[in-house]
């Protein structure tokens, strides 16, 4: 099977080579870390047991902070190595976990996977959410290294695709030692695909534990942050977070019209993709609005009064939501599947999102059931909802408080996940200690 997969991967790479070459020439993220992606990571020194944690990108790398901290406290004799699939995820790993080994996850060619496993020599592998690749799972099984899914999530859409190849997926899932999943819905889908029922445990969503909780510390920090953004204490702020193409245009147009109703309104816009920071800045200026980039503010620039703040830095959005009067969470007006609504909810902000939220259905249904969020069908409904909440600040504040209650009720996934991991963290005979 590994040979067949290698042949399929190779054929796919050949067919896609013109596109891959173009992307490598035009985007840094497509030409970064290839030595590591093919297994040329630096060999791990020493003989201490090691847990390898794979978080695919920035969001996943950020949400595992409490898990990594508690794991290090409970088992200080274990090394923790972190892999990621993106250059922004790699930068975030180095920022959040200084002193920890960080590297790129191998491409799923059997030789690359085997080489990486030989060099890292993990005693336990944690895959965040559902980042499973067949050659990787097979190689870990051959080396008797347990693989655990943490914060597992499987959307209804992905479930439908996997059902088409259920016989293959069943084989892959049976190579996973334990599934720690976010919800009963995900647990049911995994079991339907062939995951052994006794290996599936509902531990909750780690994002709730990584969301802000220290209110006094946040307020002190947020005042300084708001001043740095040039936001006045009495200016209502609309934060558009993790926006995708089409949503930026909609928000800029809505913002211009809402300012006629609320002249003091400010907009902070945070595009999801780093390569869109420049085009979105141009979009704002073409609309006749002043714009200041967060990166320029960090270098000492000062924005014009009333300027739109473009959040063109990584890893700050969760904190910036604390500046919001109202928060729109993107990836939801367009058929992308939505982005996380937990961070603004943790700041007690009223949350709005579009109809396409399959990736975060469980969380959003809880928010809606408690009157802590509003779902809108399109940009016109979003504008009407924002206008209504700006006109009724007490109702908006009540929504925000309900949102925080939802977050607080759902905390505890880190503790439950660590309890599920504990059997794999006990002293065991070393395996796979051969050197590259």
Image (cartoon, grey):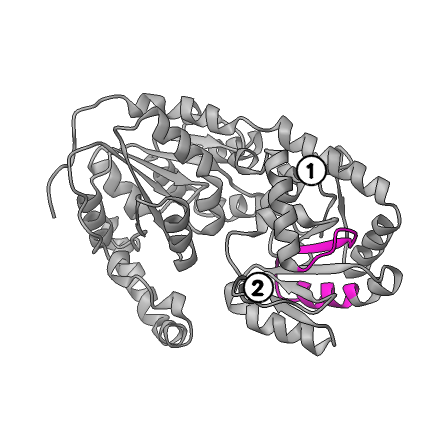
Instruction: Measure the alpha-carbon separation of dots 1 and 2.
Output: 37 Å
Q: Nearer the viewer, residue 286 or 41?
A: 286
Residue 414 in the image, given as x and y percentages of width and height: 47, 29
Quick one: label 1, few (<14), some, or many (20+) residues within 10 Å? some
Q: Which residue corresponds to mark 1?
A: 365
Q: Is residue 249 rendered to the left or right of residue 118?
A: right
Say what secondary structure mark 2 lies in. Answer: helix
The range drawn in magenta is 230-255
- Residue at image coords 40%, 33%: 69
Examine the rendered structure and indicate whether residue 62 appears above or below residue 24: above
Q: Is residue 178 rendered to the left or right of residue 230?
A: left
- Residue at image coords 53%, 30%: 204
Q: Nearer the viewer, residue 265 or 16?
A: 265
Residue 266 in the image, given as x and y percentages of width and height: 74, 60
Residue 90 in sight in this render: yes
Residue 333 in the image, given as x and y percentages of width and height: 69, 57
Residue 14 in the image, given as x and y percentages of width and height: 31, 70
Say what secondary structure mark 1 lies in. Answer: helix
- Residue at image coords 35%, 38%: 171
Q: Say if the magenta span includes residue 404.
A: no
Q: Is residue 308 rendered to the left or right of residue 194?
A: right
> Which quadrant would residue 336 be assigned to in this image?
bottom right
Q: Which residue corresponds to mark 2?
A: 297
């Amino acid at each position: 099977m590994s040979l067949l997969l290698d042949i399929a991967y190779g054929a796919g790479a050949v067919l896609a080579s013109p596109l891959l070459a173009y992307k490598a020439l035009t985007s840094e993220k497509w030409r970064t870390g290839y030595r590591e992606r093919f297994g040329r990571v630096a060999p791990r020194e020493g003989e201490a047991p090691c847990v390898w944690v794979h978080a695919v990108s920035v969001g996943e790398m950020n949400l595992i902070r409490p898990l990594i901290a508690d794991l290090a406290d409970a088992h200080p004799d274990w090394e923790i190595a972190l892999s990621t699939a993106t250059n922004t995820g790699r930068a975030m790993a180095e920022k959040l976990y200084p002193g920890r080994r960080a590297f790129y996850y191998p491409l799923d060619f059997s030789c690359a996977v085997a080489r990486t496993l030989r060099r890292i020599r993990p005693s336990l592998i944690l895959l965040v959410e559902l980042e499973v690749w067949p050659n990787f799972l097979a190689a870990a099984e051959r080396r008797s290294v347990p693989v655990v899914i943490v914060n597992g999530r499987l959307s209804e859409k992905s479930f439908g695709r996997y059902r088409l190849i259920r016989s293959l997926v069943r084989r892959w899932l049976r190579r996973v030692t334990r599934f720690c999943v976010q919800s009963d819905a995900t647990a049911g889908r995994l079991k339907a695909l062939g995951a052994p029922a006794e290996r599936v445990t509902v531990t909750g969503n780690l994002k709730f534990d990584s969301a802000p909780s220290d209110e006094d510390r946040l307020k002190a920090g947020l005042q300084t942050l708001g001043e740095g953004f040039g936001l006045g204490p009495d200016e209502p702020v609309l934060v558009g977070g993790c926006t995708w193409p089409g949503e930026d245009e909609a928000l800029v147009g809505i913002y211009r019209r809402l300012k006629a109703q609320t002249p003091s309104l400010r907009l902070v816009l945070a595009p999801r993709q780093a390569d869109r920071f420049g085009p979105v800045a141009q979009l704002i200026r073409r609309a006749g609005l002043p714009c200041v980039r967060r990166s320029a503010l960090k270098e000492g620039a000062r924005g014009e009064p009333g300027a739109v703040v473009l959040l063109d830095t990584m890893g700050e959005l969760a904190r910036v939501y604390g500046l919001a009067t109202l928060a729109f969470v993107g990836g939801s007006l367009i058929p992308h599947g939505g982005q996380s609504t937990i961070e603004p909810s943790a700041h007690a902000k009223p949350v709005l999102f579009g109809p396409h939220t399959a990736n975060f259905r469980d969380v959003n249904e809880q928010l809606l059931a408690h009157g802590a969020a509003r779902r809108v069908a399109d940009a016109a409904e979003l504008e009407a909802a924002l206008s209504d909440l700006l006109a009724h600040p007490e109702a908006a504040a009540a929504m925000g408080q309900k949102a925080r209650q939802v977050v607080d009720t759902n905390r505890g996934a880190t503790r439950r996940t660590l309890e599920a991991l504990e059997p794999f963290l006990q002293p065991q005979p070393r395996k796979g200690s051969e050197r590259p």
